[in-house]
Image: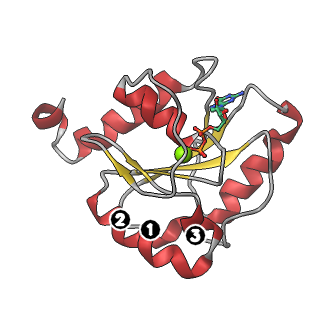
């Protein structure tokens, strides 16, 4: 399940994971595929909608929680990542842009309650994708799911 602020690259990542190469669509809806849940940005922009994310997370193996290196506006509440029972992977998206923001992103992930290591991700430049996949496969393995689903 992928969560993050508007335009941080959530749909781009799930499209990559799903091997979808068509046009990038913008939607307010939650988009499920066999492997991904693309959560609307509105759910983190409004604290009263957090309950929807927490409900959706019950279907998730793990959460990819993004902060956007190109735009570091605060969107999460302090400790937000601790709401979940499944593992949360802290990801710095669009790491190809504004490298001067990297430290701010790390501080944000720490404030949100994510545990390092954090992944520097750029889907457009192909950076961090292998690391993310490895991390997710380890979580699957830990749950004994690696042979069932992959
Ligand atoms: N530079 C850069 N742009 C990206 C990256 N990932 C996505 N984008 C662009 O950021 C914009 C928003 O992406 P989208 O996936 O729709 O974000 P969402 O609102 O979080 O679903 C699009 O123009 C993407 O092409 C990335 O890793 N690097
Ligand atoms: Mg999207």
Which residue, as the protein is rendered here, is positioned at the far top? 125
Name the residue rendered at 69%, 33% in the picture: 94
The alpha-carbon separation of the residues under discs 2 and 3 comes to 15 Å
Residue 121 numbered tag: none
In this figure, which residue is indicated by the disc labeled 3? Answer: 80
Residue 59 at what x, y percent from top left? 27, 59
Q: Upstream in the sequence, badge 2 or badge 3?
A: 2
- Disc 1 to disc 3: CB gap under 8 Å: no
- Disc 2 to disc 1: CB gap under 8 Å: yes
Q: Nearer the viewer, mark 1 or mark 3?
A: 1
**Residue 70: which quarter of the image?**
top right
Residue 89 at what x, y percent from top left? 50, 47
Residue 72 vertical position relative to residue 33 in the rendered view, above or below? below
Q: Upstream in the sequence, badge 1 or badge 3?
A: 1
Mark 2: give few (<14), some (14-19) or many (20+) Cα within 10 Å: some
Mark 3: give few (<14), some (14-19) or many (20+) Cα within 10 Å: some
Ligand 2 shown in quarter: top right
Residue 76 at what x, y percent from top left? 66, 66
Left or right relative to 35: residue 3 = right
Which residue, as the protein is rendered here, is positioned at the far left? 148
Tell me the SS state at disc 3.
Answer: helix
The alpha-carbon separation of the residues under discs 2 and 1 comes to 5 Å
In this figure, which residue is indicated by the disc labeled 2? Answer: 56
Residue 40 at what x, y percent from top left? 51, 57
Name the residue rendered at 67%, 49% in the picture: 67
**Residue 108: which quarter of the image?**
bottom right
State which quarter of the image contains the C terminus: top left
Nearest the viewer among 89 and 10 is: 10
In this figure, which residue is indicated by the disc labeled 1? Answer: 53
Left or right relative to 56: residue 150 = left
């Amino acid at each position: 399940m992928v969560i993050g602020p508007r335009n941080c690259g959530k749909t781009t990542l799930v499209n990559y994971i799903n091997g979808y190469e068509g046009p990038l669509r913008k939607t307010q809806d939650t988009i499920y595929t066999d492997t991904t849940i693309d959560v609307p940005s509105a759910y983190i922009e409004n604290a009263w909608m957090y309950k929807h994310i927490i409900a959706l997370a019950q279907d998730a193996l793990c959460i990819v929680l993004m902060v956007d290196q190109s735009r570091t506006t605060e969107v999460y509440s302090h400790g937000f990542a601790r709401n979940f029972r499944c593992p949360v992977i802290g990801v710095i998206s669009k790491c190809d842009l504004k490298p001067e923001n990297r430290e701010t992103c790390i501080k944000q992930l720490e404030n949100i309650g994510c545990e390092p290591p954090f992944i520097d991700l750029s889907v457009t430049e192909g950076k961090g994708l292998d690391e993310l996949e490895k991390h997710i496969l380890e979580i699957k393995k830990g749950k004994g799911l690696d042979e069932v689903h992959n």
